[in-house]
Amino acid sequence: MAAPPVPATPAFRLNLEQQRNRARDLLRAVQAGDADALARFHAHQPADRRPTLTAAQHVIARELRLPSWPRLKAHVAAMEAARATFAGAAPDADRRTLHIRCGSDIANRLVEAGFVGDFLEYSDPICQGPVTDAPDWLDQRARFIVGSVGNPLGLTVEAVRANLATAEERLDAAPAYERIVLWFEHDSYDQLLLARALARFAAAQPRHLDLVCVDAFPGGQRFIGLGQLPPEALRLLWARRQPVTPVQLDLGVAVWAALQAPDPTALAEIARSGTPALPVAAPALLRHLRELPDTRDGLGLTERLALTILVRQETTIGRVFAALMTRDEPLPWLGDLMLLAIVETMARAAEPALVVDPEDAALPWPQRRLHLTGAARAVLAGQRDYLSLGPLERWVGGVQIRPGTPHWRWDDAAGMPVRVG
């Protein structure tokens, strides 16, 4: 159920001459009074700043998420230097190394970048479905995954259960390596799995445990995750990795325990602390908690975002996913099949919120058009609560949400969960 590997995005492999040309084009457009160019220019320059090439270059650098043109030049040079080292000695050859990632998206790119260590894909999407401390929690996970995406991928409970068990066994055996490197980004998918790994390593500490954890990277596209980056970027991030601290291990233990709890209060308290040991964790935990039914309308945040996109224009599942990734989702975290599971769940409520166009049944699922129902429009208008539509039971970590029974909701104004019923 992990997001499939994607090609590295060219937007993160910057060419300095191309950026110089972009700055010149921007300057000419500003001098010609183009409204869009003026808006871009003054988004990063004072209103009274005279348009010059230096000023335009500064704007280009800021748009690429760098603080200045000199920093942009330095970044491009560092990427080029990293690319030139691929044929040299492997950066991880000095110790027997295991790279752990919550997906397979960077596995081949690590090889391209010259790494020789082993790779562990640890990718159970615990940001969705039940995550409990029950002895059969892997069985619960396998049944959930197959129930969510079993049809598109042809999965069986037995095969998924075996894969999950193998990943857990490899995680248990990981401390035998001389060095473990954790490669994670800032969203809830990654941060919850990182917490699981840290909790495991707190119980049996490896000899050398490093962390690569990023929430941004310079480029001409929204940064979503490590899978967008070219191999040379991984060499730069390797050089910036940091040893995992005891406080970070303790944080992983606390988050993992709180995630499994049937009461989300402890997880919310951790999120509200700001998690100074790992600052990117707090926003991810808050984003996860916003999947609880909201006190205003009973919708989880992803459900509301999907419906709101369809209010603007009824479109296909694939285009809803694209809108989430590029614009609407404040902290992108889910793969395309994970969205499909949410859409299908909303379509299977006693009173469906969505209908898949029957004429599209033979099309690949991303091309199937979605239509809002009157019930969904009533929910968005504040006239009905989504849970009154009879949606299927779902889980947010250890929190079970079953319509018609007491359950937890998210109070967005207060930034905390509340018990209802």
Image: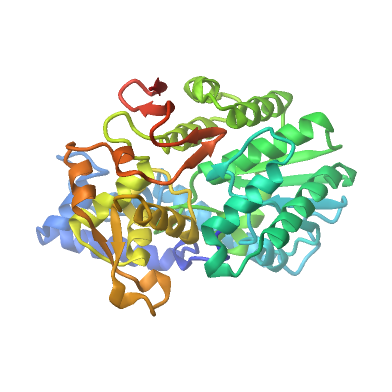
Q: Furthest residue to the left?
A: 33
Q: Based on the displayed image, in which of its 4 quarters is residue 222 positioned?
A: bottom left
**Residue 395 placement, left or right of 138:** left
- The quadrant of the picture occupied by the C terminus is top left
What colour scheme was applied to this rendering of the protein? rainbow
Q: Furthest residue to the bottom?
A: 362
Whether residue 214 appears in this view of the structure is: no
**Residue 81 placement, left or right of 225:** right
User: What residue is drawn where x is 30% and y is 24%?
Assistant: 413
Name the one closer to the observer, 18 or 135.
Answer: 135
Whether residue 337 appears in this view of the structure is: yes
**Residue 274 placement, left or right of 46:** right
Q: Based on the displayed image, in which of its 4 quarters is residue 304 positioned?
A: top left
- Vertical placement of 48 versus 309: above or below? above
**Residue 213 placement, left or right of 386:** right
Q: Based on the displayed image, in which of its 4 quarters is residue 340 positioned?
A: bottom left
- The quadrant of the picture occupied by the N terminus is bottom right
User: What residue is drawn where x is 64% and y is 45%?
Assistant: 140
Q: How many marks?
A: 0
Where residue 132 sits in the image (x, y, percent)? 64, 35
Where residue 369 sits in the image (x, y, percent)? 29, 69
User: What residue is drawn where x is 33% and y is 27%?
Assistant: 412
- Vertical placement of 207 versus 108: above or below? above
- Vertical placement of 326 versus 151: above or below? above
Name the one closer to the observer, 322 or 12.
Answer: 322
Where residue 85 sits in the image (x, y, percent)? 71, 64
Where residue 130 sits in the image (x, y, percent)? 58, 41
User: What residue is drawn where x is 62% and y is 52%?
Assistant: 143
Name the one closer to the observer, 13 or 102.
Answer: 102
